[in-house]
Image (cartoon, rainbow, N blue to C red):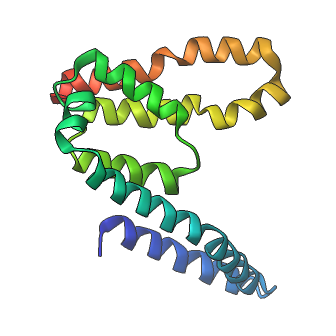
C-alpha cells in the first residue's frame, strides 16, 4: 500500500468515526453519497485508464520524447501548455493520462506545464467562466494565466533537468 492510500484510508476512517459519533445518521448518509459517487465516476475512470494505456502503447515513445521529452526545450513546454488546456475532465482523467505520458518519456517540465495549464486554462471550464464572469474578466484572467504554466514548467525544466 502506498503512503497516499494509507493517509486517505486513515482520514476516511477518522471521518466515519466522527460522523458516527454524532449519532444523527450522517455516517450512513456519507457512505450512500460515497457509493453514488463511486458508481458515477467508475466508468469515467476506466475510460481514462484505457485512454492512458492506449496512448502509452500507440504513440511511439520516441515521438513523445521528441515532442515533450526532457530535451524538448521551450517547444515542448509550449506544446504541453496547448495540450493541457485542451484536456477534458477532472483529475481522475487527466492525472492518469499525464502519468502514462511521463512513463512513456515525457519530461518533468512539460508534464508540470501540462498539469498547470489544465488546472488554470482548461477550455472545458471557459464556457462557465464566460457565462458567469463575462468576457472582460475572462480575457484578463486568461491573459495573465497563459504565462503561469510556462513559468512552472520552465522552472522544473531548469531546476530538475527536463
Residue 121 in percent (x, y) is at 57, 28
Q: Is residue 123 left or right of residue 156?
A: right
Q: Is residue 38 left or right of residue 68?
A: right
Residue 152 in percent (x, y) is at 37, 24
Residue 52 in percent (x, y) is at 38, 55
What's the residue at 70%, 76% (across, down)? 36
Q: How many marks?
A: 0
Query: In this orientation, which residue lies closer to the viewer: 21 or 39?
Result: 39
What's the residue at 33%, 23% (across, down)? 77
Res. 107 visible in picture: no
What's the residue at 51%, 57% (across, down)? 92
- Quarter occupied by residue 25: bottom right
Query: In this orientation, which residue lies closer to the viewer: 42 or 26?
Result: 42
Q: Quadrant of the N terminus?
A: bottom left
Residue 24 in percent (x, y) is at 81, 85
Q: Quadrant of the C terminus?
A: top left
Q: Is residue 120 left or right of residue 4?
A: right
Res. 88 visible in picture: yes
What's the residue at 84%, 29% (across, down)? 131
- Quarter occupied by residue 38: bottom right
Q: Is residue 144 left or right of residue 29?
A: left
The relative height of residue 105 versus residue 146 in the rendered view (above or below) is: below
Amino acid at each position: 500500500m502506498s503512503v497516499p492510500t494509507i493517509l486517505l484510508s486513515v482520514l476516511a476512517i477518522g471521518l466515519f468515526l466522527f460522523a458516527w459519533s454524532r449519532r444523527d445518521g450522517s455516517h450512513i448518509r456519507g457512505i450512500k453519497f460515497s457509493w453514488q459517487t463511486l458508481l458515477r465516476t467508475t466508468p469515467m475512470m476506466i475510460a481514462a485508464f484505457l485512454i492512458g494505456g492506449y496512448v502509452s502503447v500507440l504513440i511511439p515513445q520516441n515521438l513523445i520524447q521528441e515532442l515533450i521529452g526532457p530535451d524538448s526545450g521551450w517547444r515542448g513546454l509550449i506544446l504541453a501548455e496547448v495540450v493541457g488546456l485542451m484536456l477534458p475532465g477532472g483529475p481522475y482523467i487527466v492525472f492518469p493520462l499525464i502519468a502514462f505520458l511521463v512513463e512513456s518519456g515525457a519530461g518533468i517540465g512539460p508534464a508540470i506545464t501540462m498539469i498547470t495549464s489544465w488546472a488554470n486554462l482548461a477550455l472545458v471550464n471557459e464556457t462557465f467562466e464566460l457565462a458567469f464572469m463575462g468576457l472582460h474578466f475572462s480575457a484578463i484572467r486568461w491573459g495573465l494565466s497563459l504565462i503561469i504554466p510556462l513559468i512552472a514548467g520552465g522552472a522544473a525544466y531548469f531546476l530538475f533537468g527536463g
